[in-house]
Image (cartoon, grey):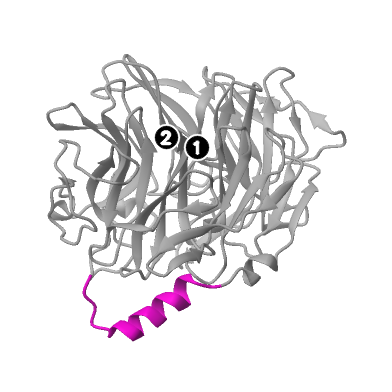
Amino acid sequence: MKSHLGLPTLLIAMTSLFCADFSSADKPVTLNQKADGYRGVWYMNQPSGDEYVYKYSGGLGTYCSKHKPFAIYSEQVNKTFFCFGGATADDNRKLLHMVSYFDHETNTVPRPTILLDKQTDDAHDNPVISIDDEGHLWIFSTSHGQSRPSYIHRSKRPFDITEFELVKATRADENGRTPITNFSYMQMWHSDESFQAFFTSYNYPAARTICFMNSSDGREWSAWQRLAAIGQGHYQVSGIGESKAGSTFNYHPKDKGLNWRTNLYYIETPDNGRTWTTAEGNKLSLPLKEVHNEALIHDYEAEGLNVYLKDLRYDTNDHPVLLYITSQGYEAGPKNDPRTWMLARWTGNEWKRSPITTSDNNYDAGELWMLADNDWRVIGPTGSGPQPYNPGGEVVMWKSADQGATWIKLRQMTNNSEMNHTYVRRALHAHPDFFAIWADGHGRKPSHSHLYFSNAAGDVFQLPRNMTSETAKPTRVELK
């Protein structure tokens, strides 16, 4: 890639951004302490000066859609392991990385482990979880840009949340190997004895450059591949199928600021990042740099619409299925309605797009479950909540029997709530008793935040906010 900087200047700049030593990673203590309950972090972004108070806000312990996954079921031990952005009992804005599990044999949860104090109130620093072939739990602690370090932790024992150790990971580069001390929007997939990571690097060269790397052991990683660097950069949501991994992304036009994100793109790799193609199988040369390229699914910029990415799944034919929201602008409130939940599905010959429902905020977030070819579900806060037009609301389950062409409302999962439910996330390899996890919080002022999960039928359970014993049973939430 050419640069207007001279080579020495460019190398110095890149070194300062990505080659910090591990001393910074040793300062925050890996706490390995026990919390006395499940309390989520409250977060806000960009005060708006209107009745909605912020661009977005709320109980964001499972934020954001560009972090995946938050929960994974392990059949071997019959537990669903999960992580979340927690908070202390006396400060709902102090971000703690917490790890726990739901025991399907006893229907109980233990006291969550406090892994580390991220030393911020920014929910963009929320962790994600992975499990390797030996059963070790991996926690990837992201950062929002380059102002804070990122961390990788591994459980000392398989399927055990008691004690984690800091992993001093490195990546390949032109000089040999470089410590990995910073990454944003991490999405981690493990299969076939390999980790595949989709993430964001700031100012490399775009403001938000989407990247990929892989590793067989979680310690030594491949070189970072830049997937796209169009305009001011991108948000991406990734997924993994039977024979491929892929990314769907939007882009930030250069002249409209980072609050504007538009267009819908998709790329995939069948060989752990060695080659990249379109859904049709056409090979791509990366990073993509032009707005109009072979990966473009739909030109939403021409329609004046923003695109907010939510999920990427693969159907039984290993074809990609994308979930996202379109709207007319970034600000909260009815002027940017409708917020349309959309599905884009590759049939093997073409992309088909279909609407699911509408909601009232760009940051309403849910995901897609595929139970059978005739049973696709979307669970998300599509119902208007107690703080309308703020992120989240009441949780609803939607169903399609025709692979996304049409949808029906299957079940109202919450109602008459005191605060908005936000960021409904799918458990990987989900057990029917622990299908989704999310949090709640007030949309317009700092508040406490509870954690919830649901089963496949749509029954909702609240995790215990305060615990006086080592384990406890979640409480069923009844519709009012």
In percent of width and height, residue 10 lies at: 34, 80
Looking at the figure, which quarter contains the N terminus? bottom left
The answer to whether one can see residue 317 in this image is yes
Q: Is residue 238 left or right of residue 319?
A: right
**Residue occupying image coordinates x 70% and y 51%:** 165
User: What residue is disc 1 on?
Assistant: 424
**Is 325 or 414 nearer to us in this picture?**
325
Boundaries of the magenta span:
1-20
* Residue 51 in view: no
Say which amino acid is labelled 2.
Glu
State which quadrant residue 372 falls in: top left
* Marker disc for residue 367: 2
Identity, as a three-letter code, of the amino acid under mark 1: Val
Q: Is residue 28 left or right of residue 21?
A: right
**Is residue 474 toward the left or the right of residue 444 in the image?**
right
The residue drawn where x is 37% and y is 68% is 174
> Residue 152 placed where, x, y %?
59, 53
1 and 2 marks in contact (CB < 8 Å): yes
